């Protein structure tokens, strides 16, 4: 991609690197899609189930999700309850009741008893037929796709506290009883919710209006009604209507809702991670490309409370000149003495800039420096609060240890805070 962006502009019409990168990502996706499409077609053909219409639908699939929906009925499965029922010859029971709901389910089932296969009475036969219906529902590509889209647009992400986790999960308190439209959950909140679930604090679930026990389920746009409409099931008081309606409800609650919840949570996580990386990249770019203060003598403060404020002075090239620790904050509260030490250091080395890390006690330390500047205007100091992200990592690195073998790690962090003001890229 870099080669094409620089040396083949005439072949791309002058596309820039961002456009080419998007094309490259799309090309990789399409190549993987084509590879999977070939695998799917080969698998279905080996089962002697590849019809012209099915092949056309598979070849027309434009996303991996659509392709997997089409492949679902033909994907090799473990031996399910539905498969056992099919092997026992119970599929005609379901087909008969779907075709004519005016029949008594028990009467139809009585003609398909198979004690050897574990279907010795009508109730067992009807349960087997229902298992076939549940599996058949999950294999309807168009239906599953429509339900997935509906759940994404209308569903709520609901978060609840797991009993007994109030103390250990206090940092997730905002999400102990929380809900929000799934497709509107911002990336930072989604990642926090998933982190709470992975730490065993939160229980997450997808609730689609019209399906939750606490809401009405007579909405004609609900998932139940969409499934019923797909199979032309209508509750008109006929003998089999109640059995078919219950089968529809179970198809959503025990099969499709769980499958779709898993898929949509994965989609949300992927979107959230992509957005988080984008935001992090923008923030990092702004940080690294911040205007450098330049080659000026700098006094840096790494704020702290109980352990004190670490102080270093570096020259215009970033070389360490002097270091100490002051204790202006509780518990020692040596405020005036700390100002005196800073004034002495600034005067001795001709300090021009004061760099303050933005960690714990940053605001209190900033107030200390402002008072220093008020008491000693002759020093002509300029103070700036800078991000100390990464300072601790640097201070314990082999690079820092090689440069400052005899310097405490916390004071090495203060050196980093000084240098990053002089030049963020350093």
Image (tube, rainbow, N blue to C red):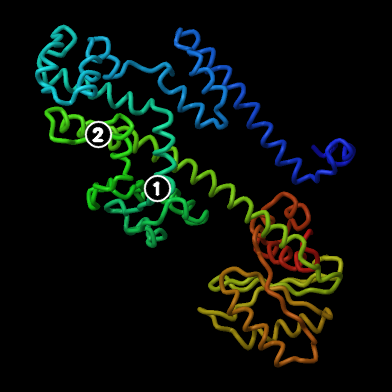
Q: Which quadrant of the figure contains the N terminus?
A: top right
User: Which residue is drawn at the image coordinates 13% and 22% (left, top)?
Assistant: 103
181 versus 324 height, above or below: above
User: How many other residues sit within 10 Å of disc 1, few (<14), some (14-19) or many (≥20)?
Assistant: some
Q: Position of residue 414 (x, y in %)?
A: 70, 66
Residue bearing the label numbered 1:
197
Q: Position of residue 56 (x, y in %)?
A: 54, 20
Q: Which quadrant of the figure contains the C terminus?
A: bottom right
User: Which residue is drawn at the image coordinates 50% and 32% (left, top)?
Assistant: 65
315 or 13, nearer to the observer: 13
Corner quadrant of residue 391: bottom right
Q: Is residue 1 left or right of 257 when viewed as pictured?
A: right
Q: Is residue 208 left or right of 119 when viewed as pictured?
A: right
Corner quadrant of residue 362: bottom right
107 versus 142 height, above or below: above
Residue bearing the label numbered 2:
250
42 versus 334 height, above or below: above
Q: Secondary structure at mark 1?
A: helix
State if disc 2 and disc 1 touch (CB < 8 Å): no
Corner quadrant of residue 92: top left
User: Which residue is drawn at the image coordinates 63% and 88% (left, top)?
Assistant: 336
Q: Position of residue 328 (x, y in %)?
A: 59, 81
220 versus 329 height, above or below: above
Q: From mark 1 to mark 2, how far is it between C-alphas?
A: 26 Å
Q: Secondary structure at mark 2?
A: helix
Closer mark to the observer between disc 1 and disc 2: 2
């Amino acid at each position: 991609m870099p080669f094409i962006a620089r040396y083949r502009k005439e072949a791309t019409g002058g596309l820039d690197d961002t456009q080419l990168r998007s094309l490259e990502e799309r090309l990789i996706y399409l190549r993987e899609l084509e590879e999977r499409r070939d695998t799917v077609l080969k698998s279905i053909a080996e089962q002697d189930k590849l019809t012209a219409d099915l092949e056309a639908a598979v070849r027309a699939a434009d996303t991996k999700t659509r392709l997997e929906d089409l492949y679902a009925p033909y994907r090799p499965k473990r031996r399910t309850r539905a498969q056992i029922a099919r092997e026992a010859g119970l599929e005609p029971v379901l087909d008969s009741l779907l075709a004519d709901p005016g029949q008594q389910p028990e009467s139809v089932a009585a003609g398909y008893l198979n004690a050897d296969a574990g279907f010795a009475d009508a109730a067992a036969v009807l349960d087997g037929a229902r298992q076939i219906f549940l599996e058949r529902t999950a294999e309807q590509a168009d239906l599953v796709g429509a339900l997935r889209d509906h759940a994404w647009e209308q569903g709520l992400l609901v978060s609840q506290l797991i009993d007994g986790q109030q103390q250990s999960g206090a940092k997730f308190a905002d999400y102990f009883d929380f809900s929000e439209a799934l497709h509107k959950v911002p990336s930072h909140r989604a990642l926090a919710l998933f982190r709470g679930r992975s730490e065993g604090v939160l229980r997450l679930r997808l609730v689609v209006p019209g399906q939750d026990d606490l809401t009405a389920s007579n909405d004609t746009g609900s998932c139940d009604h969409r499934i019923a409409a797909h199979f032309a099931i209508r509750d008109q008081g006929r003998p089999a209507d109640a059995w078919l309606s219950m089968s529809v409800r179970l198809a959503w609650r025990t099969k499709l809702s769980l499958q779709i919840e898993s898929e949509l949570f994965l989609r949300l996580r992927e979107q959230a991670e992509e957005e988080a990386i984008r935001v992090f990249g923008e923030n990092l770019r702004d940080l690294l490309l911040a205007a450098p203060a330049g080659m000026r003598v700098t006094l840096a403060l790494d704020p702290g409370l109980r352990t004190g404020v670490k102080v270093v002075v570096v020259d215009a090239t970033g070389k360490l000149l002097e270091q100490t620790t002051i204790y202006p904050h509780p518990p020692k509260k040596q405020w005036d003495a700390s100002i005196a030490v800073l004034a002495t250091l600034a005067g001795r080395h001709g300090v021009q800039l004061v760099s303050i890390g933005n960690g714990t006690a940053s605001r209190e330390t900033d107030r200390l420096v402002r008072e220093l500047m008020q008491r000693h205007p002759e020093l002509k100091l300029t103070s700036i609060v800078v991000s100390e992200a990464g300072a601790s990592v640097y201070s314990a690195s082999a690079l820092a240890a090689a440069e400052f073998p005899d310097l405490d790690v916390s004071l090495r962090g203060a050196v980093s805070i000084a240098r990053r003001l002089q030049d963020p890229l350093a």
